[in-house]
Amino acid sequence: MKVVNSLPRVYLAAGRLALKRPWSYQSCIRQAASFSTAQGAGDRHEGHPPTAPPFAVSDPSSAAEPRFVASVHRALERSGMARIKLAFPDPGSRFLEELVCSFHAHHGHRLPITHSASRGWFWDVRPSDGTVIPLQTAHHRARSETMADFPWHTDCSYEGAPPRFFGLHVLQHDRYGGGTLSAMNIERLGAALSPEARRALRRDEFVITIPPEFIKDRSKTSIVGNIMAGGDGGGGGGGDETGSVMMRYRRDLLEPTTTAAARALRELDMLLDGSAGGGNLAATSTVHLKASDCQAGTIILMDNRRWLHARNHIRDPERHLRRIRWDAIPFPQE
């Protein structure tokens, strides 16, 4: 299905490649149509990545209802994605906040992390030039505060303990067809890399710069570490019992420190931009969530270590999402 706005190169490759009243579980959750992909529902084939199972919620108290919380948690564990559609207004994102606290209470997730020295659990993802809408970190404009596309990345790749999950509450979707959110399966991406590249990416041979808007300690502006873990018998670590491949990645923050690291990063770049078979990889491992899939009132939950995500150009200056990140665990090292 063609997206309204023209897509940047990475998307072209991917296109190829406890409240008071009682709550009734059965009445508040139902299955809906699955996410659409670049090929459209009619063109899906065996091997296409799993799409997030959507839940329709009509009662705010479901965020604290154990059976509902367990169902969403199972969806996250199974595919690394879940989508929730709220049938009630929630301008303060209280449902999302309470749901994450329920994951903490019932499923052992760590509580959310703060976004910076000046921001708490929530971060508003919306265009801002610092005038009409003030910047959330003084004098520093985050990439999420622009209308530009945002290539493949994981959240908080610059943290020693990146959050395992993030959630996005859509307060206003892009009414003009922009802001498509894409997600690429990291397990399949890792399998497409050469053994040499995987070994190099698992070594502590990368400087990862901390963006100015997310610095929490002024004396610390970067970290050194690996950007891939697990796979090839490496073990998952960090509370991950599957031993599956996981990544922390944002290309503009990475600087390899050895020849082998630079070579491995080039190979990864070629896969992500559609070269070296990257088109075929993306076609079977990428999900595209258009604005029509994620209208106002939608909540998207994603496993930050199992999926890379990206966003194309925003067309609607009033597009507004609210983000939360939680369950921060030290990134595994070899």
Image (cartoon, helix red, strand yellow):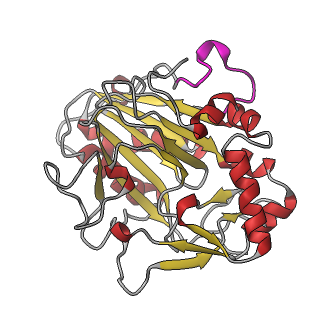
69 vs 220, nearest the viewer: 220
Q: Position of residue 194 (x, y in %)?
A: 85, 55
Measuring 80% from the left and 43% from the top, which residue is drawn there?
A: 276
111 vs 280, nearest the viewer: 280
Judge from the rendering whether residue 264 lies leftward or rightward of residue 26; answer left or right.
right
| Extreme residue toward the top, this view | 42
Q: Position of residue 186 (x, y in %)?
A: 66, 49
Judge from the rendering whether residue 206 lies leftward or rightward of residue 27; answer left or right.
right
Measuring 80% from the left and 71% from the top, which residue is drawn there?
A: 260
Judge from the rendering whether residue 333 lies leftward or rightward of residue 219; answer left or right.
right
- Residue 105 picture quarter: bottom left
Q: Position of residue 237 (x, y in %)?
A: 66, 68
Q: Is residue 59 magenta?
A: no
Q: Position of residue 165 (x, y in %)?
A: 48, 54
Q: Which residues are magenta?
A: 36-49
- Residue 44 picture quarter: top right
| 135 versus 50 height, above or below | below
Q: Quadrant of the N terminus?
A: top right
